[in-house]
Amino acid sequence: MSSSSSVSSPRPRRVALFVTCLVDLFRPSVGFAAIKLLEDAGCTVEVPPLQVCCGQPAYNSGDRASARAIAAQVIDAFEGFEAVVAPSGSCAGMLAHHYPGLFDDDPPMKARAENLAGRSHELVSFLVDVLAVKSVVARHDGTVTYHDSCSGLRELGVKDQPRRLLESVQGLRLTEMKTPEVCCGFGGTFCVKYPEISNAMVAEKSADIAQSGADTLLAGDLGCLMNMAGKLQRLGSPVRVRHVAEVLADMAGLAAIGEPEAKR
Amino acid sequence: MQSTAHDFKHNVDDALADPNLQDSLSKLKVGFSERRRQAAERLPEFEALRDAARDIKNHALANLDFYLEEFERKVAGLGGHVHWAPTAADARRIIADLCRSVGAKTVAKSKSMVSEEIALNDHLEALGIAPIETDLGEYIIQLRHEPPSHIIAPAVHLTKDQVADTFLEHHRALGFTKRLTERNDLVAEARHVLREKFLKADVGLTGANFLVAETGSSMLVTNEGNADLSNTLPRMHIVLASIEKVIPTLEDAAVLLRVLARSATGQESSSYTTLNTGPKRPDDLDGPSQYHVVILDNGRSSVLGTKMQDMLRCIRCGACMNHCPVYGAIGGHAYGWVYPGPIGAVLTPQLIGVEEAGNLPNASTFCGRCESVCPVRIPLPNLMRHWREREFERHLTPRAVRQGLALWSFAARRPKLYRRLSGLANRLLALFGRAHGHYRTLPLAGGWTRFRDLPAPPAGGTFHAQWARHGGARTRP
């Protein structure tokens, strides 16, 4: 299970992993895959213990006060690290784009939020854009399709980076959906507040996944992945669903999302 | 128009169960976005033009009083009249008075979303004045007594067959007894019927895409040329527009036109771009003898200088709804009032109250596709979030959501407690989900499991538990 990056010898960076609450609760392997990828690229990875959630559920529900309190906690937890990396475009986007605006009336905190924003990255774009990783050593036999999760794509410009690294995975063939950039209908609390609309969106996404002919669906955000995996399973689809980091870290031997572990 | 925005969830159920609507939406989702993408790609400076368009509108909004007064001066100098309407009722009264002053029986209208906003047609009909919609889409929905479902394609929710049935029903009395099946034949029949009505109309009423302060012109783009007949044939031309339509110069209009058509329909420019600059002059061959511009506020000025001001940059291209996956799933009528889609979710709470329209800014995944195509770069998700904040402050957020959120954020602010709770949840979900790897039903998770399975976590504990167990750094499962 060893893999290495083709990057010559980047100076070791002290990187903090922002695990994200969904990875912590539902898919710990994504966190370990992230650590492996970062270490292989020459980083020293730490997992600050006081981290919890980025605060999006409160922020996107209009509860600005709670979002601020949680953001302040995250800012404290990640003080002093060269980079903060999350295996999620959504959570990284929250840190990188939305935290400073929460402290418009508190200049010292705003400065700290801006400082954190500048150090915050989505995992795969950090590997490619910052660490100049060009390839991974991993194997995955089959045809995969990649869903561009909204925040990663539109807030952080994550589009080509995962595809470039996937190209280096042996045995892997990438096939595109017709509309990989259209939202899957997850949207955090949206999917339970407006389940009918969310269902219509994820049903359409599932049809697009099916017509792509891929046997595996990948993406960089666990919320979207759980939504799509859950719908595909409800529909009886044979398509398996994984976080892109698991494939890049050569950990795809694990049961896919929502699959029983016996198949391991 | 009577709002049903408060009944959003019911509207959504209806929309999702309507096969004709779903058929129409499936075409719209692909067509508009693909044409817009191609148009943007053909123009290398498109992104720079979007910046310029944003800056023009920002400048106009920052100096709105100046440009509106400048516009009024110019219109007066041309022999026209500007009427200020603080509210929808004021605008209705002003227009009705103008119509009655010339004894109007019929008003030929070209498409105007502001006239929908002030429910003008119902008002005129009640006064015995017949409004006739001359935009093909507006004409179709007028026959069907429906509101528009899209700001530039008002009948986009209908299939060709539905239009054929509607025409047969309403045109039979005029001698058109054959049910048409070809698109062009339907258009030809509508044109024939409408031409008669243009010729008889006493007043022409149009909207405006822009009001140009330096010349006093109102500018209008259409693809059907109907506006040109509405404003040249009748004796009186009334322009109905809202305050944020004013821009400084014709040069500015040229920039905005370049992003408008490309964003809306993927055209380089709309088929007809018309400038109306005052009433008929002595040497003109045709034109109205009276020219009136009714300028509506209706609550817009109260967002000037606030975080919400950005919504007033909108040039009504419809790109946000064409690219919105929520609009694509439910169509425009589900939004329950005049303006659907992302811009509707931002404007409607401002215009009719967040109590009435509170669902609209919540029914978004914040996917951001609207903002990514907006020609004037309105930060639509941020503005929707502002509405959610206002609702939360005023305790309008549903109680179940508030309580759930309060519990969650109580825990999220206490990392040790949160860790214990997520550890417990992880173990329970892993234990009972072990056999299948996912749940088909789960107590308290019905919103999720009604339509999809819930993946179960694998055994072994949360990430943090595993990390701690293995002593941290360089440990792999």
Image (cartoon, rainbow, N blue to C red):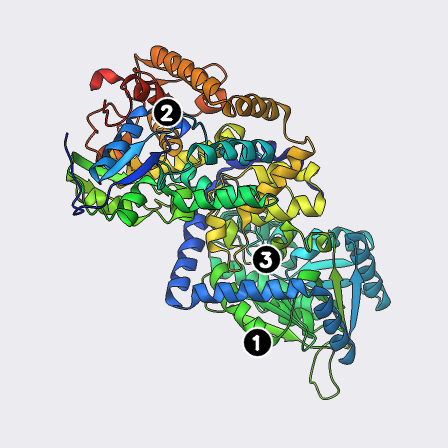
- Closest to the observer, A122 or A254: A122
Residue type marked 1: Glu
Task: Say which residue label 3 marks.
Answer: B314
Q: Is residue B111 left or right of residue B103?
A: left
In front: B221, or B309? B309
Q: Amino acid at mark 3?
A: Cys
In which quadrant is the N terminus of chain A drawn? top left
Same chain for mark 3 and mark 1? The answer is yes
How far apart are the alpha carbons under marks 3 and 1? 18 Å
Q: Residue A246 lies in what quarter of the image? A: top left
Q: Residue at x 51, y 46 (%)?
A: A111
Estimate the x, y position of residue A165 in percent, counting from the top left. 22, 44
Mark 3 Cα-neighbour bin, 10 Å: few <14, some 14–19, many ≥20 = some
Chain letter for mark 1, please: B
- Tell me if residue B247 comes above or below residue A82 in the rendering: below
Q: Position of residue A41 (x, y in %)?
A: 22, 40
Q: Are marks 1 and 2 in contact (CB under 8 Å)?
A: no
Q: CA distance from mark 1 to mark 2?
A: 55 Å
Q: Which residue is mark 2?
A: A24
**Residue type marked 2:** Asp
Whole-angstrom CA distance, mark 3 to mark 2, is: 42 Å
Question: Which disc number belongs to residue A233?
Answer: none
Query: Which residue is located at x 40 percent, y 27 percent?
Result: A22
Classed neighbour count for the residue bearing mark 1: other residues with Cα under 10 Å, few (<14), some (14–19), many (≥20): few
Observer-nearest residue: B130 or A160? A160
Dot 1 corresponds to which residue?
Answer: B251
Q: Nearer the viewer, mark 1 or mark 2?
A: 2
